[in-house]
Amino acid sequence: MSDRHGGDLQALARRSGRPAGSLLDFSANINPLGMPFVAKAAMIAAIDDLAHYPDPACTALRAAIGQHLGVAEERIVVGNGAEQLIWWLPRLLDASRVLVAAPAYLDYRRAAAVWQRPLVSIPLSFDEGFALDLGRLSAQLRSGDLVWIGQPNNPTGRLVNPEALRLAATAHPQVNWAIDEAFIDFVSAAESAVRWGLPNLIVVRSMTKFYALAGLRLGYAVLTSARAADYIRLLPEWSVNSLAAAAGAAILNDPALPDYALRTRALISTERRRLTDALRGLGLEVIDGVANYLLLRLPLQAPTAADLADRLLRSEGIAVRVCDNYEALDARYLRIAVRAEVDNQRLLTAMTHLL
């Protein structure tokens, strides 16, 4: 099973025989509005700072995150993307086992393997819409476990009921609950777990998807202050570069941020609904998710997801994410990002032709 991610434009360009800049990338789930203007301005203003080492404590950025979320700065750890924090978490917690409801983000499994922690997989069912049964999960828990919950899940886009999740974490205080909120900013009226105040809770968030900064690598975790201090000692000292820190602080301090967020969520909601209806009209099965991507299952008579993806890439210059390397998914599944209307229409036209 491959551990590849989506969004590798250089590899896609080589396969397609086209320049990377000409590809329409539905394989990575990035805000179609693009990065906020203040992020670009902040990076330009900070360019001369590259002659110096970054602030290892990310003081200004952690202050901005704390203000944005309403949590103490001492509880915040900033990393080189959420991925870095995910990889080091089993080591920080000295997890006895790692539990993952499958399908789920690949790096939960990869991090468990790197730190040689036993992985317990809990397969989710297509017939149940890949909904997570917290009762079934809780029945398998042991003291010292680390449980990963995507909120929303990647690749299904499903959201676990926040109150049910809070109660489950409260009922199992000897289990560490890691809530991956990398895509939660795309979800209207979503409840973050950062304010629950549970000592066995770790919330990991990304700033690269919602703010279109994927190449910059910026994420953070919120946990108890004692664990945060241990986390900081564990990570490399200069995990976050000066430009990333400047861009992140500028975004979160921007008075125009609420408008940017509202416009993003409105666009994603409208286009997700339009894409879902159109794709179902083509005979595809679409999982009802709430994120800025859709998990699709192709009909039995259709080409495999890999075959369809290859045709889209070579003939149309469109990249989609084949999902056969996710546990519990097979060769019929693919994931597409929700992009702007003109891009989504181009994808729909191409898929109508090929299917």
Image: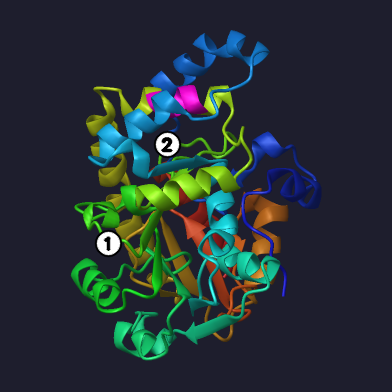
Residue 182 appearing in the image = no
Q: Which residue is mark 1?
A: 198
Does 282 sit left or right of 91 as displayed? left
Measured in 3D between alpha carbons, the distance from the residue under mark 1 to the one under mark 2, in whole angstroms, is: 28 Å
Q: Residue at x 53, y 13 (%)?
A: 46
| Residue drawn at the location 40% of the way across and 35% of the way down | 33
x and y percent of residue 73 in the render?
33, 36
Residue 184: x %, y % from top left? 34, 53
Q: Verify whether residue 197 appears in magenta.
A: no
User: Observer-nearest residue: 107 or 145?
Assistant: 145
Magenta segment main secondary structure: helix
Q: How many numbered marks have been drawn onto this rendered protein structure?
A: 2
Residue to which mark 2 is pinned: 211
Q: Amino acid at mark 1?
A: Leu
Q: Residue at point 66% right, 67% down?
A: 115
Q: Position of residue 322 (x, y in %)?
A: 62, 66
Say whether residue 348 is left or right of residue 280: right
Residue type for callout 2: Tyr
Q: Position of residue 180 (x, y in %)?
A: 42, 59
The crowd level at tag 2 (other Cα within 10 Å; few <14, some 14-19, many 20+) is many
Of circles 1 and 2, the one toward us is 1
Label of residue 166 in the image: none
- Quarter where residue 71 is shown: top left
Give the mark, 1 or 2, whose residue is nearer the N terminus.
Answer: 1
Give the crowd class for mark 1: few <14, some 14-19, many >=20 residues within 10 Å: some
Q: In this rendering, is residue 24 above or below 313?
A: above
Q: Is residue 298 left or right of residue 224?
A: right
Q: Which residues are magenta?
A: 245-249
**Image height check: is 308 above or below 39?**
below
**Element type where label 2 sits in the image:** loop
Q: Considering the numbered disc 1 on the image, is that residue within a helix, a strand or a loop?
A: loop
